[in-house]
Amino acid sequence: MRNAVRRFLLAGACLPALAGADAGVSLVAGWNLLGNSNTAPVAVASAFGDADKVWTVWKWNKAQGKWAMYAPSLSASELAAHAAEHGYDILTTINPKEGFWVRTKAGGAFDIGMPAVPPAPGAMAGALQADDLVAGWNLVASTDNKNPSQLEMGLRKALRNKGQAIITAWAWDTATGSWRMHAPSLETQGIDTLRAHLVQYGYQPFATAPAPTDGFWLRIGNAAPASDPPASAVDAAKAFMSTLRSNARALDAEDLSLKTELEAVADDLRLRTVPVSEFTTDTLQLVQEAADYWDNTVRDTSAPFTAQRREVNGLWRCGLYADAAAMTVATSRNDARYLACTTTPRPGSKAFINATDANGTYKPCDAVGEVCGTAWTLRLLLQPDPADAHHYFVHTRTVASRMTVAAVAYGYYDNMTSKYIEGADTCPSGESCWVEPTAWNETQTYASTPAPGVAATLSLTRDEEGAIDSWALRGDLAPSVQFDMQPSFGYDGALGQWIYRQNHTAEVLGEKHEVDLSVAWLQHDSTAHKLALQGDIRLIRQGQVASWVGFAPGSTMEATPDAAGSYSDCSSGQRMHLILHAGSPVSTLEGGLRIGACQYDRSGTVYEPTQFAFTGSVGRNGAPFFEGTISADHTGLPSFDATQGAHAANTDVGRVRLAGNVSIPNRPVLSMQLDITGADSGTQGRVWWSGQYAQGTSVVNLSGYGDDAAQVLTLESNTGVRLVLDSAQTVHPLTVNGVLAGYLNTEDGTLEYTDGSYEQH
């Protein structure tokens, strides 16, 4: 379950989450429209009684047609006087299924007893019913997990029996500071009519279903009572099933599958674009540091000459050499011809893969000759152009070094002196010592390119103070490496013990990258690094272009270095905004990619961006395929411990949203919206679906959930046709405006209509 959700969800290496383990809801400063979808009422004074945070709370009393209000800054007598003067009721309680407004002085988290994750549609008492609504305006909340179109379809028959109907639905979009709006009467005229109305008046669509903590308005008006469907109801059902069947086949075709294609795009972003971008950032920073090192040590004759290798920001080890093989250390400026640098991955970093035993568990490294693991490093050889101080020749290699212990030292507590002794050559007899490796042997394997590596050229400019502020890199770079860590913790019955497996792997993405990049620093100080970049990188695999990524003007990368100058510890300051054109020989990608809010899980072993959004288009074989937005979030990652695995107290929750148009050859364009939420508690996983697609004037809504025991999916059209697919059943009813029109038998694939006809599916 967790791997399936992760594959579906993340481009950019992230598995999204809906909420933390608590029942809090985050509010912004100003007006917030919320809802109580829990089965218990909310005591207003307890939940919103902090006058330092809250101005007022408001609820619309639909039965009396008046407002009820509460202000924590007013005493009981002051509140009563104010309410009486303005004709308000005094607000004390917010009941289940009621919406309410909160005006806050500052943003923050409020515990109002909301569900942590959405329930199965209609499974709780918080699901909205027709009897909950009155004629006029209703400020409500619901656990239906349905957008207004789906909600109207579900309540249509019951409301019409009361002579009522939903006229409009409204919700306040805090992010954009505008209203979201839906009108069923406009939707029946076609999805384009509804969209044109929204654009004309500046409203936003209901792209997803309101969350259980959201409040929204429903305006209920008069309508003719429900009547029996016409005799053509079966024909409507047949037309619905015919369209549904043909669309399902088209979207799930072996050579053109929406799910397959979008998963491929997500994998390309996660496994190609992100590591290539990270590798490019690291390489460019190393190139800059190397050029600075050369200029400050060799070209600046007033500076002391440092012949020995040194650490650069704690991340790279560099030195000046007289030969291209970097074997003869330079003794002066006169014989310094080359500068060689290498990254220095340390145990625990993603570029250092620890050795494991036969069971896949961590193996200690504390004896001479023992294998500690494999360190993946980037090696750079810089040769300054003697004719041009702004020009350099650059060679790079990607190297895997098998590290074995060459020497160790001992430490122990000396009872005679009451001191800790470290670095001893031997362990004294009778002492309990710990062992620390002090030197390693390396067995190097080049990733496709031996020394001196692939070649590129670097041209740079400097500001008035002599610091590098822009550069251009053209030629070839060594291949990047994709690191993957999927730790697991569980009981191994064969071993009879609990086992933690790091499951840490590395994959070289190709032989090299062909680059043509221009980069400029927007900020480069101790608090933040931000650069703008444009140009192209092409991944070469087996002599062919396997994939490519280009950055248009406006693309930026940001990161906050730690005290040693490393980016290994992620922070909220790390993010990418890339205006991309990318692809492979089969698929292409055009649009904007935002990846950010990098965080570790609670154990500190899994590092992922927690926010992802792509807006643009996907092409296949030179033809448009998908155009729209794919977004995901994983803000609950810090509270999830990946080393424990998922269980009841450690649930991993994720969400992905898709909205856009799908173009299939020889078929009408499908306008789709899909919201998928997944929760994995180890022993049980559950997924919720909510969405719709429109084809011309036909709109089909879908909602449902699935877990390890059952799956329930409801499909309903704006013409009143409804099909509920329940995996616990083999026969599924097909209805039109609540009247039975046929049965779908999933055991033998037959669909029998009430007029006696049948179809084979």
Image (spheres, helix red, strand yellow):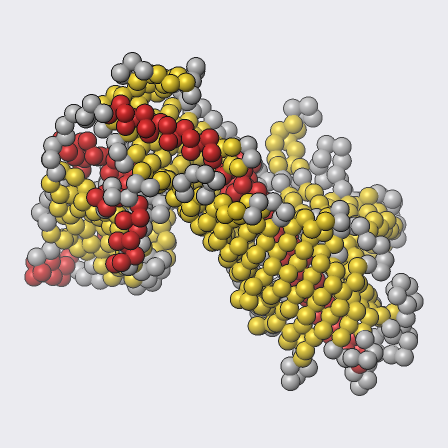
Q: Residue at 15% x, 43% y: name it.
A: 220
Residue 494, placed above or below residue 310: above
In x, y percent, where is residue 580? Answer: 55, 58
In x, y percent, where is residue 582? Answer: 59, 54
In x, y percent, where is residue 365? Answer: 79, 44
| Quadrant in which residue 156 is drawn | top left
Residue 531, placed above or below residue 170: below
Of the pair 667 and 369, the residue shown nearer to us: 667
Residue 598, placed above or below residue 724: below
In the drawing, does residue 400 fall left or right of residue 496? right
Q: Residue at 83% x, 78% y: name it.
A: 386
Residue furthest front in the image:
666
Of the pair 110 and 148, the residue shown nearer to us: 148
In the drawing, does residue 577 fall left or right of residue 127? right
In x, y percent, where is residue 332? Answer: 89, 78
Of the pair 85 and 256, the residue shown nearer to us: 256
In the drawing, does residue 671 fall left or right of residue 637? left
Of the pair 503 and 516, the residue shown nearer to us: 516
Question: How many marks on residues?
Answer: 0
Does the image show residue 433?
Answer: no
Q: Residue at 43% x, 38% y: name it.
A: 667
Does the image show residue 66?
Answer: yes
Image quadrant containing the C terminus: top left
Residue 166, placed above or below residue 323: above
Q: Residue at 79% x, 53% y: name it.
A: 399
In the drawing, does residue 699 fall left or right of residue 278? left
